[in-house]
Amino acid sequence: MSQWKIVYTVQAERDLHDIYEYIALSLLNPEIAKKQTQRIMNAASKLDEMPFRFSLYNKEPWHSKGLRVLPVDNYLVFYLTVEPMKIVVIVRIMYSGRNTETQLR
């Protein structure tokens, strides 16, 4: 089975940084912040073998565009697959309690 390359958009990297900062600075727990961001990145890295195992996001227009969602603890990792080049693009990472439709625009 050939492996897929995982890439993060600038927005996804910013999302990950914001998650870390919120937990580390607002909740005053840098150790948990580091562990949480590592769990998210570890889960995303496992998409290199079976990127289609997670479901398509159920709302339009994202469903038609092939946007998939990987749940990690209380967070959602949104990603696209680029089949000819075998690339998984991590588009956004956000807290599951947020209004995801607004954030995806």
Image (tube, helix red, strand yellow):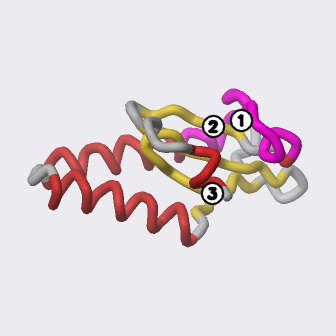
The stretch of residues the image draws in magenta is 45-64
Residue in front for this viewpoint, 66 or 39 = 66
Total numbered labels: 3
In the rendered structure, find residue 69 and report the number of the disc placed on it: 2
In the rendered image, residue 31, in percent from the top left (x then y), is placed at 14, 49
Above or below, comparing residue 5 to residue 67 in the picture: below
Pointer 2 local density, CA inside 10 Å: few below 14, some 14–19, many at least 20: many
Q: Residue at x 58, y 63 (%)?
A: 8
Above or below, comparing residue 31 to residue 49 in the picture: below
Q: Residue at x 64, y 54 (%)?
A: 104
Tell me whether the residue at label 3 lies in contact with that at label 2, contact meaning CB atoms closer than 8 angstroms: no
Q: Main secondary structure of the magenta part?
A: loop
Residue in front for this viewpoint, 20 or 2 = 20
Residue type at tag 2: Val
Farthest residue in the left direction? 28
N-terminal-most mark, 1 or 2: 1
Q: Quadrant of residue 56?
A: top right
Q: Quadrant of the N terminus?
A: top right
N-terminal-most mark, 3 or 1: 1
Would you name the residue on which mark 3 appears?
Answer: 91
Which element is circle 3 on?
strand
Q: Nearer the viewer, mark 1 or mark 2?
A: 1
In the rendered image, residue 95, in percent from the top left (x then y), is placed at 43, 43
In the rendered image, residue 77, in percent from the top left (x then y), is placed at 55, 44
Which element is circle 2 on?
strand
